[in-house]
Image: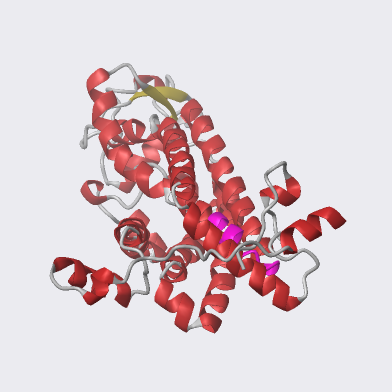
Amino acid sequence: MENKEHTCSTPASESSVSSSPEDSKTGSGHAARYAKVYGFFGFNRAYNFPLWVIFAGAMLGFSLSRLPELNYSHFFKEDDMADFGMVPGYWYYVKSGSFRVGMIMHLATILPAGILMVLQFTPIIRHKFITFHRINGYTVLLLILISNAAACMVLRHNHGGGARIAAQSAEAFLVIITTLGLSMAWWNIRCKQVDQHRAWMLRTMFYMGTIITSRFMEFAASPIITRIGGYYGVWSCDEIEFLYTQYQLPFPEQDYPQCFLPDGTLNRAFRVAINAAAIETKPEQLSSSLVQPFGALLWICIVVHLIGVEIYLGMTPREAERLRQVSYEKQLEAGFANPGCAGLTADRWGDAEKWTPKR
């Protein structure tokens, strides 16, 4: 332990972490105008700004676009089939009880969190409004944790049959990794380990963005599996009857004659196979075409986001090193016994080379 403390606190040669060149800001033409734009938001490097616009913009746009869902019953129940708020038939499960409570809690927390999180990644706010940044950070953390707890209340429904298991496991995995990511980010900032705080907050935001990516892929998957054919979901006859009643349509007796008992009454508990086909006049089949691929899509999106954020972190070592130096100075000023390595760093907990400060 003594050796580790000594290694992290021994000054090294004077070599400052390189920062962005100022030539573009003092020059003329498109580069200078672009520098003024990203400089207005507090960015020092040109490559960060378009990434912020794309990913933070997607998070902000998606969260704002889903705000009407807070008018819960109207949005999810009364929308017509051509413009449904959720997958047809889903209302059967989330109209009442713990599923309804969980959905409302989830939407009321995750949507504001998605909006406020964008502010956390805006440098001008982080630099000039430090107190707001801290309060907003704790607000986002609390909202996401409540949202994850609420999601756990909802994900156990079995709409769509066996394919739901893949989605349930993916959703549970998202709850775990976002909670873990937030915990790691919180602990590191408590230890003033700014570089690791940045890394874990970026990871958490990218993990949360999985849902947005899956929504776009879902629209492509539905017509694809319709064209391929041979995919089926499993519904109870009661679900079908509920869905058609919701849209004020007669029960499709010709498609599901097995739903009826010999005396003509509906066998509500009986389950039937539902063809997964994007046919708007058959809402149960349209729903099945959306539900069946969702679990696989979610897992694919999770893997893409996991890899993507690690690639970005691996390609920005200079920024990580700059913030490691900032961490060292903050920890040294605060009187930490192990400045530069007080948080969850690889050289403290793993077998990485011992880090030494630059000044």
Residue 293 quadrant: top left
As drawn, 177 above or below 294: below
Q: Is residue 332 left or right of residue 146?
A: right
Q: Is residue 226 visible?
A: yes
x and y, in percent, of residue 117 in the image: 46, 66
Residue situated furthest left in the rendering: 29
Number of numbered markers: 0
Q: Is residue 170 magenta?
A: no
In depth, the one of 262 and 327 nearer the eye is 327
Q: Residue at x 66, y 62 (%)?
A: 188
Quarter of the image with the C terminus is bottom right
In depth, the one of 18 and 287 nearer the eye is 18
Q: Is residue 236 left or right of residue 150?
A: left
Residue 87 quadrant: top left
Magenta part of the protein: which range?
190-200
x and y, in percent, of residue 104 in the image: 49, 61
As drawn, 349 above or below 322: above
Quarter of the image with the N terminus is bottom right
Q: How is the image coloured?
A: secondary structure
Q: Is residue 214 left or right of residue 327?
A: left
As drawn, 4 above or below 190: above
Q: Is residue 146 visible?
A: no
x and y, in percent, of residue 283 in the image: 28, 37
